[in-house]
Amino acid sequence: MAVTASELMNELHIDTDDVETKTVQGLIDYAKEIVTDSVTDDLTTEQLETKYPKLFDLATKNLATSMYYDRELTNGTSKGYQMVIIHLSAKVAIDMKKGSDDDGNNET
């Protein structure tokens, strides 16, 4: 359930053309990297996106949207983005702790 440029552009009512699509896709790609780096050093973007799809996509959309309207994030990130990052970070930390409690075996 990865975030796509066309999906985000539709949600934000952005006119679709090649330039805007390329811009939005670039912002989504940057947002994914930033979300991953903000949450963990132990998982890849693909792992986070697979294990926590709803939270990861929400954080990605929040950040990409903020960067679309304010490339420099003049006032920082939104409260919504910060809330999702905290929630996602907590879930990752809890799952990592569970993994270390049972010698890394998370299979159920």
Image (cartoon, rainbow, N blue to C red):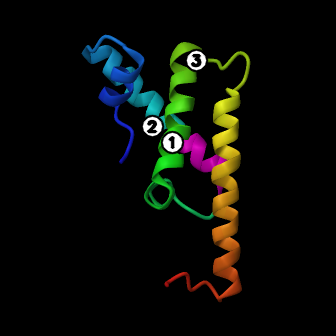
Quadrant hosting residue 93:
bottom right
Q: Is residue 53 left or right of residue 81?
A: left
Spatial CA distance of label 2 from label 1 is 5 Å
Are dots 2 and 1 in contact, CB under 8 Å?
Answer: yes
User: Label 1: few (<14), some or many (≥20) within 10 Å?
Assistant: many
**Residue located beneath label 1 in the image:** 32
Tag of residue 29 = 2
The secondary structure type at the circle numbered 1 is helix
Membership of 26 in magenta stretch: no
Spatial CA distance of label 3 from label 1 is 15 Å
Quadrant hosting residue 85:
top right
* Residue 20, horizontal then vertical, whole percent: 34, 16
Q: Which amino acid type corresponds to the residue marked 1 in the rendered image?
A: Lys
Q: What residue is drawn where x is 63% and y is 52%?
A: 88
Q: What residue is drawn where x is 69% and y is 81%?
A: 100
In the rendered image, the vertical position of residue 8 relative to residue 100, given as above or below:
above
The secondary structure type at the circle numbered 2 is helix
Question: For the magenta stretch, what is the residue range?
Answer: 33-40
* Residue 92, horizontal then vertical, whole percent: 64, 62
Tag of residue 71 = 3
Membership of 35 in magenta stretch: yes
Q: Which amino acid type corresponds to the residue marked 3 in the rendered image?
A: Arg
**Camera sees residue 53:** yes
Most distant residue in the top direction: 15
